[in-house]
Image (cartoon, helix red, strand yellow):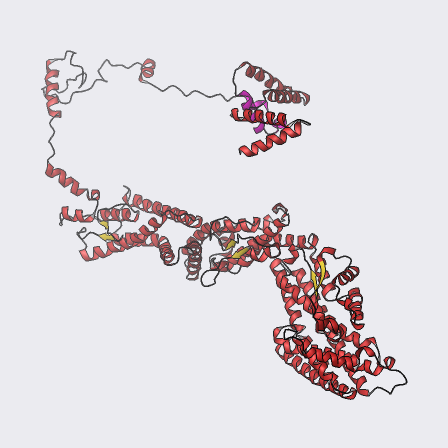
Amino acid sequence: MANDTSLLVDRLIHALIKNTSEADIERLKHSALRTFANSHSARVNQFEIAARLEGLEEKWRILNKDFLAEALHPRRAELSSMSNRWAPEILSLLLQLSDRPVDHSSVVDLVLPKIESPPAPLTWADIVAEDPLDDRDGVWNNIDFTANESNDGERSDSLHSDGSVPLPASSANGRADGACIETLIEPATNISLREIQKAQFWGFQDAEKFDEDCNPKMNLTEMQAGREVIFLLLGLPTSIFSQKNNGQTAVSEAGFLAHASRESLTGLLQGFAAIADKLLGIRRWVGKDETIPLEQTFQAALASRLESYDHALSAIESKILSRDAQSFPSLLELYDKMSNLSRLPLQIHDVLLELDVGPQLKRPFRILEFLFDRACVNQAVGDVEGYEYMANIFFDCFQTYLGPIRLWMEHGRLTGRDAVIFIQRDERDVHLNSVWETQYNVIKDSKCGLHAPKFLHVAAQRIFNTGKSVDFLRRLGWEDHGLRRDLAKEVAMTYETVCHPAYHGPFSPFAELFDMALDKWIANKHQASSSELRAQLESRCGLRSSLDALEYIYFANGALSTNLSDWIFEKMGHGSHRWNDGFIMTDLFHGSLGSIPFDRLEICLRPVTQKESGGAQRSMSVLENIWVSYTLPWPIANVIRTDSIEVYQRVFVLLTQLRRAKDLLQRHKIANSVPTTDKEPPLQLYALRHRLLWLSNTLLTYITDMVLSTATADMRIAMDRAEDLDAMIAVHQAYITRIERQCLLLKNHTSTRQAITSLLHLTILFSDAQASYAGNTFTDAKADREHATYSDDEDEDSDPDSDVSSRRLALHAELPDAGRLKHMLDTFNNLHTFLTAAVRAISKADSAPCWEMLANTLAMGLGK
């Protein structure tokens, strides 16, 4: 606090005083701090208060309220004449508490109410003064009835008159005789006092002492026994019942009722004791010192019900013991009344027994589960009173449990108490790219079940996502006052508003009514936060533009397909080493997609081996070294995960390989590449080119039109319909899974993917064969053999696809021209047949129509 004051004083001095030396600044600073230290409290400026009052008076006069100004002026003058050091503070407080005094002030409020003095009490002196007493006949004199003389009609002035007043002899004798009679009191003996104490049996503390001291032949009435029973149920100590060490209630063995046998009476009293034991267990549970709010609320609800129960017992006691009662009910009748009255509280005892069995950590929400289940059971068996009783207690407790949930859903904050609800915060530092999935977690128990009441399991995910949405919005710089919640649609979670007993009656399923009300309560908050988060992601974070950028970059849509791919293929076709220049590729990307921020896009090239650098145009696997890196904004990175970018990259490589194969086949036609003086090229060369070109177009059309275009369109539609960020993540993840599966990029499709790569490698072999017929010196047989020999000496860490193509190139180089073409045709037919069968098998396991269409298209090519 002192450090903050010093910093504020230093800033204030620098702001007020310019061009001052450091010594003067330090001197002023120490002076100000010393003044603050010696001042106990800040004083109000009395001149400012006087000016405000004067301004108020002047404003009243301007507004033609002279009566108020004239009422204020003399009071100000009177106040100024009084010496009070706290007068400015008091006036300042009154001015701050005032509410528009110009509009709301009234002279009528200044009139003090007149307090009427109570009338003087009526005394005998006033009565006598108004109507004097006529005591001529001695009407008001006291009569001495103790006089034993023959003249009984003689009166005396007073039985207790002063001894100094002379009295007649007869009066004196009568006074003396009367005094002797009044003092004749028979003293109480010890035996009679003991008998009186025995008669008051309720004064004994326990039943054993009562059994020892009481006469066995002494009987009690049913009224006395019934009163003891009521005391027992009220939790009060009684004489005919006692508490054992184990907490059970014991019954006295003495016989009380003359008309009942001891066995029948003891059995009846034991029935009362059983009821009292359960009630005593509830009273003990209410008296526990609990710290969890939900358990405290449950205790308060039970205390309220016990209070109502005690009032009902007291009313029964007052009714049967009143003077107007015709007769006292028998103990059997009283047992029926007590059983019916105690039926509902005793159901609470069953709930408490179930709570003591479970672990302490689960007890808060287990209270809600047991109350919820008991209400449903009571309704199912037709116990309307029990259903309403348990449902009301449930909603009393559920309001407390709903408090932390409301705080989480409306403000995205937790209460800080452990295990209050089923959500916990990860206190470790979390990267913003994964804050949605890693910052908050759902608490699970040892059996991987949700740490929440069973009736909340269905709605738990929406509750969890709503709070995360609010927290996510706060990280974006948004405040919760912008949420457009419909307060009119918010349901109050009470018994009257949820169950509507007057409308639905007691037979509408309680679980269904509760689920409907809770769903409305959650939907009001969930829809507000989710819609706001969607709007922020689209307007401020650029969700749509990021999806467009990924589609343009990795799926090679538009101008990117012609600019970048053509440049790479041209450099590779001429054997240039500049094809793998990442800076040039990045510039080409930015030239094609100018709307993408420059710092988010980068092309990285993995280090290439000497084999790949020397013969890049002779391998399809070398294209896998191109790695396109596009950095997403952190809010969008929570929707599009990092592993999804890897799938985008693999699709990019596959499309680039297909376009590379198509480019090799279309770059030079056979008729144009072969000189007219040479012999006519064999038909096998035309057939091989036709089949390779047909296969490349088929696979490229399948991936771009049937997979990517369809899946992307479906993803955009589903993304627009997503309710929250979790749904958006699920939509994009399903989109990535669909692309990875239908593009044959899964691990279980490895053999099919290798077959496609081998077919694409045949285009390189075909280009070599075509070049040999055209007399191209770049790929003559000698170069083929040298490259094949080099490929055999490569290390074992090379790519498997590259090794397969190298071995195939080596075998191809050892064959003559006619043998090469025949070998390539045979290889194509074998791989084509295998690919068709593999796709057909996948189509049987996967019901997607694209597989069947691809299988049929590939099967059509088998006969060509």
Displayed quadrant of residue 647 = bottom right
Q: Which residue is found at the position 61% from the left and 75% from the top?
A: 748
Q: Quadrant of residue 586?
A: bottom right
Q: 140 left or right of 26?
A: left
| Furthest residue in direction right, as rendered | 677
The percent position of residue 752, horizontal first and vertical second, equals: 66, 78
Residue 426 to residue 183: above or below: below
Viewer-closest of 487 and 400:
400
Q: Quadrant of the C terminus?
A: bottom right
Q: Is residue 825 visible?
A: yes
Residues shaded magenta: 86-111
Q: Magenta: predominant secondary structure element? A: helix
Query: Residue sitting at 69 percent across and 27 percent down?
Result: 19
The picture places residue 16, in percent across and down from the top left corner, at: 66, 27
Residue 397's spot in the image, x, y percent?
45, 51
Residue 813 is inside the magenta segment:
no
**Foreground residue, 671 or 327?**
671
Exactly how many numbered labels are in the figure?
A: 0
Q: Is residue 90 magenta?
A: yes
Location of residue 209 in the rendering, given as x and y in whole percent from the top left corner? 17, 47
21 relative to 229, above or below: above
The one nearer the camera, 757 or 139, is: 757
